[in-house]
Amino acid sequence: MSITSESELVGMKKISEVVGTTLKLMRAYAKVGMSTKELDDYGGEILKRYGAKSAPYETYGFPGYSCISINKEAAHGIPSEKKILKEGDLINIDVSAELNGFWSDNGGSFVLGKDIHNHQPLVDASKHILRKAIQNIKGGVRISEIGYLIESEAKKSGFKVIKNLAGHGVGRSLHEEPENILNYRVKSNRERFKKNTTVAIETFISTNSTVAVELNDGWTLVGNKGGYVTQHEHTILVMDNYPVILTKSNDIWD
């Protein structure tokens, strides 16, 4: 959305702090032996306390308050009592919600406990690439150039990007224009970031795959060539210089 008033900025800051704080608290709450359903219920209670509504549940009828993807699940993992967290699991939590007509989105991948499967390099690459991408976003910058930066940085780290998942505009709904802030460059895309707009920037960095495919449950995405995928996401306000990171309360870079 385009921010045109102080009240709109306040509204976006408020919901962004809510989803950021929820993500941070869920990450800290995750423990070995816990089900992803228990972790999701905890996140849902936090959103309710703030008066916020889960965006995937409200918008798409998603069977959970948040998307919790573990190990080889790339995105949109369904919280389940049957999915029990284990030492060294690669976990992604994606929290998006609505409050007072404003929507915000954020996510992050992390290793639970000891990194016994050596997932940390992939997690670190995703965090670093998101930070670098955001540092280079300002009004007038081509969206395709940020995609080029993300893919180039992934290759430098020995990884790939998922090409059919993307960041997006956010604000008055969960997904707005620009709809495809991709992790690679599409040369024909001449669209540019616009000052005073709010967008969700997210990385999808992978070990093996370049395309996410849907499982039979109608939600869960996995890589087309297997392997692992990490995602980190901030909602930002585009400015003339460095963007305002609205979801900074999630502490995904700490």
Image (tube, rainbow, N blue to C red):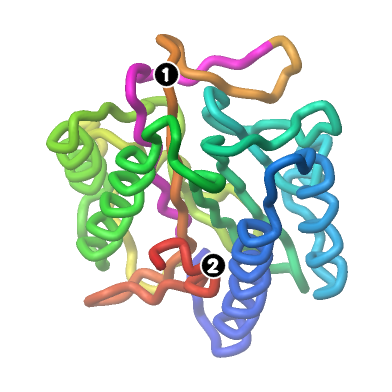
Instruction: Look at the picture and state if 92 lies above or below 233.
Output: above
Q: x%, y% of residue 26?
A: 68, 58
**Disc 1/disc 2 C-alpha distance (Å):** 26 Å
Residue reaching furthest to the bottom: 6
Q: Which mark is residue 17?
A: none
Q: x%, y% of residue 19?
A: 65, 65
Instruction: Look at the picture and state if 126 lies above or below 95.
Output: above
Residue 34 vs residue 81, the one in the foreground? 34
Amino acid under disc 1: Gly
Q: Disc 1 or disc 2, which is closer to the eye?
A: 1
Kindly identify the residue that appears in the image at 22 percent across and 76 percent down: 241
Q: x%, y% of residue 78?
A: 74, 32
Secondary structure at badge 2 equals helix
Span colored in magenta: 199-215
Secondary structure at badge 1 equals loop
Residue under numbered circle 2: 250
Other residues around mark 2 within 10 Å, as few (<14) / some (14–19) / many (≥20) = many
Residue 211 occupies quadrant: top left
Would residue 63 be found to the left or right of residue 111 on screen?
right
Other residues around mark 1 within 10 Å, as few (<14) / some (14–19) / many (≥20) = some
Q: x%, y% of residue 179?
A: 47, 42
Whichever of callouts 1 and 2 sits on the residue coming sooner in the sequence is 1
Kindly identify the residue that appears in the image at 73 percent across and 44 percent down: 56
Kindly identify the residue that appears in the image at 43 percent across and 67 percent down: 236
Residue 197 occupies quadrant: bottom left
Note whether residue 242 is visible: yes
- Which secondary structure class fits the magenta region best? strand
Residue under numbered circle 1: 227
Amino acid under disc 2: Asn
Q: Is residue 204 magenta?
A: yes
